[in-house]
Amino acid sequence: MRRGWFFALLAAMVLGSQGALAQGSAVVLPAAAEPRPERIVTADFARLPDFSDAKLSPDGRRVLFQLRQAGKVQIGYRPVEGGKTSGFAMPDGLDLNWIRWAGDQQILLGVQTLTVIYGMELPRTSLLLHNVETGATQWVMRNFKGKEAEQGLIGDDVLYIAPDGSYLLLALSKDVFSTPTVFRVSLPDGTMTEMVKARANIWDWYADEAGVVRAGTGWQHGKLRFLYRSGADSDFELIGKIDPKKEETWFSLAQIVTGSDQGFVLTDEKTGRTALHRFDYRTREIGELVHGHDRYDIDGYSLTDDGKALRAVTFTDDRDRVQWFDPAEKRIQALIDRAVPHLQAWVTSRSRDQRTLLVYGTAPNDPGVYYVLNRDTRQMAILAVEVEGLPPEKLSVTQAVTYKARDGTEIPAFLTLPKGRAAKGLPLIIHPHGGPYGVRDKLSYDPQVQFFANRGYAVLQPNYRGSGGYGTAFGDAGIGQIGRAMQDDLDDGMDWLAGQGIVDPARVCIVGASYGGYAAMWGVIRNPERYRCAASYAGVADWETMLKYDRRYLTKRASDRWRARVTGDGDLALNSVSPTRQAANVQRPILLAHGAQDSNVPISQSKKFVAALPRTAKSLVTLHVYGDEGHSFANPKNFEDWLNRLDGFLAQHNPAD
């Protein structure tokens, strides 16, 4: 069996978390031939998680989670020790943003609907409260009603929840055009008390771990205003108007320590990789290095309960990792790693007494599983799997690899080889990630990658230059290189695999979404001799019009910075690397799909590309529109349809067998 119902965790197990995976250009090939797995139906790959987003109640007695029944989101909860699952369906017309506990017996839900203001469809968010003892569900903020509550209310920005669930702090905006006021909201009666008045140009408020609002930020005249106070009895002061060139290096992940002006901050300013430093909020001075990695960016961190010492940092090498500094937490992680060595597993939720822990484990060939760990008995019992019907033994293993691009740059990547086929002369799918900047692939479950592998394809996911997590220099190497060196990195990955005989260079297609969709279209236009076909979901097709579209949602300063990153100080001629402007050069089949509700990359990008095709190329390109989808698939039926279309398209233009 792939998972037992429990694992005895022995105290003699080796301590310490697993080290970074070895990287290099050597590919691990199957030791011996194995039978080909059965063809998994696309509906199984397209399924959304049956069980997800699990959280322990503070007393450790119950677990809260999302589940799906008849395609609809349900909120469920049950005793940790087993028993009846209770819950309720999301009300019609409401989308769920998040769920969390508010004390031991109350569940808080952030929900969203759409409202029309001045002819624009905008989100309206609010809070629901559910009592697990009585089963009653009610709106929070019941004394905030009437016209104001219908005008695009932004009412789910919770800054703090009291440990006993008696109240919360809420940054509330009466509409999307108004700056928020911070209220103390009593639970469950919804009584609201104003704590911090709305201030001009201050859009975000921050509270410390004691529930004191300590800082506020907002943009004015192209600069980030920073308000700060030392405690509840102090007045807010304008500490500074921050240079936007430095804003990204520290403020987005700043954490305020209770009762102190000293804190911690993530910045790349001193090491060239995002690292944790001490920080003085009053002077805005970055202090000594607390922790950094010599190769990768630090993604996040957590502090001890008093806020004065570092408990853990998170980062991604080839996979997500937690590095613990607390000795007790190190021992727990070591026990987990030994109990489920085939998974990447870590604690995601815990009871307030730290005796009951919720552990989540996953792998590239495992959609995910939840366990409950009892520290007293040292046993870990399975709670639920995320997706039924996709056992790991039927899926393919993904490995981390590196290769050199033509200019010598080391490119990290992930390679998935199909099961039951010799690693020689395989058909290949190049599968670039979206973004492009600051985003990356990692060793994690990807249903589309597993779908390709199940159909008999090798899959390469390059973290081309410009991808995130590898330090500032690697990220900046992508500036002005869209369609150029970033595209070279994809082609060079194909050549590297072909050079080892693993893939057949005459049997390659490129498939992606968002920026990956752009790279797919551009790949077959720029190098038709390399690729037999391409498929794009929500891909950018015209960079000039895309940048103009982005300007509608960005400040002028942010828009200028984004344009400079794409063009590289204006050096990149956008039309020369835009599929729409080069549509006359289409020679290979292209499958396009786009969500009609996409606000990230508007559907006009795909439509204008199709319209620009010469008559001789129109038969090579197919566009399918999903009327109810946005930038990614929310409806599993639509995702299944897309996979079926890909299945037929690849079988026709680049068959695996």
Image (tube, rainbow, N blue to C red):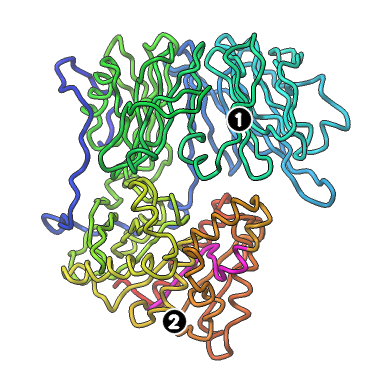
- Residue that appears at 48% across and 74% down: 577
Q: Which residue type carries mark 1?
A: Phe
- The answer for how far apart the CA atoms under marks 1 and 2 are is 53 Å
Residue 133 appears anywhere in the view = yes
Tell me residue 196's x, y (percent): 71, 19
Q: Which residue type carries mark 2?
A: Arg
| Extent of the magenta region | 532-547
Q: Tag 1's secondary structure?
A: strand
Residue 588, disc: 2
Tell me residue 607's x, y (percent): 63, 72
418 relative to 187 in the view: left or right: left
Residue 175 on the magenta segment: no
Packing grade of label 1 (10 A; few <14, some 14-19, many >=20) is many
Q: Earlier in the sequence, mark 1 or mark 2?
A: 1
Residue holding disc 1: 226
The quadrant of the picture occupied by the N terminus is: top left
Of all residues, the one furthest to the bottom in this rendering is: 616
- Residue that appears at 50% across and 45% down: 48
Q: Is residue 621 above or below residue 492?
A: below
Residue 519, disc: none
- The number of callouts visible is 2
- Residue that appears at 31% across and 57% down: 38
186 relative to 420 in the view: left or right: right
- Residue that appears at 59% across and 14% down: 211
Nearest to the observer: residue 174 or residue 624: 174
Tell me residue 206's x, y (percent): 59, 24
Nearest to the observer: residue 68 or residue 242: 242
Quarter assignment of residue 289: top left
The quadrant of the picture occupied by the C terminus is: bottom left
Q: Are marks 1 and 2 in contact (CB under 8 Å)?
A: no
611 relative to 649 in the view: left or right: right
Tell me residue 10's x, y (percent): 18, 17
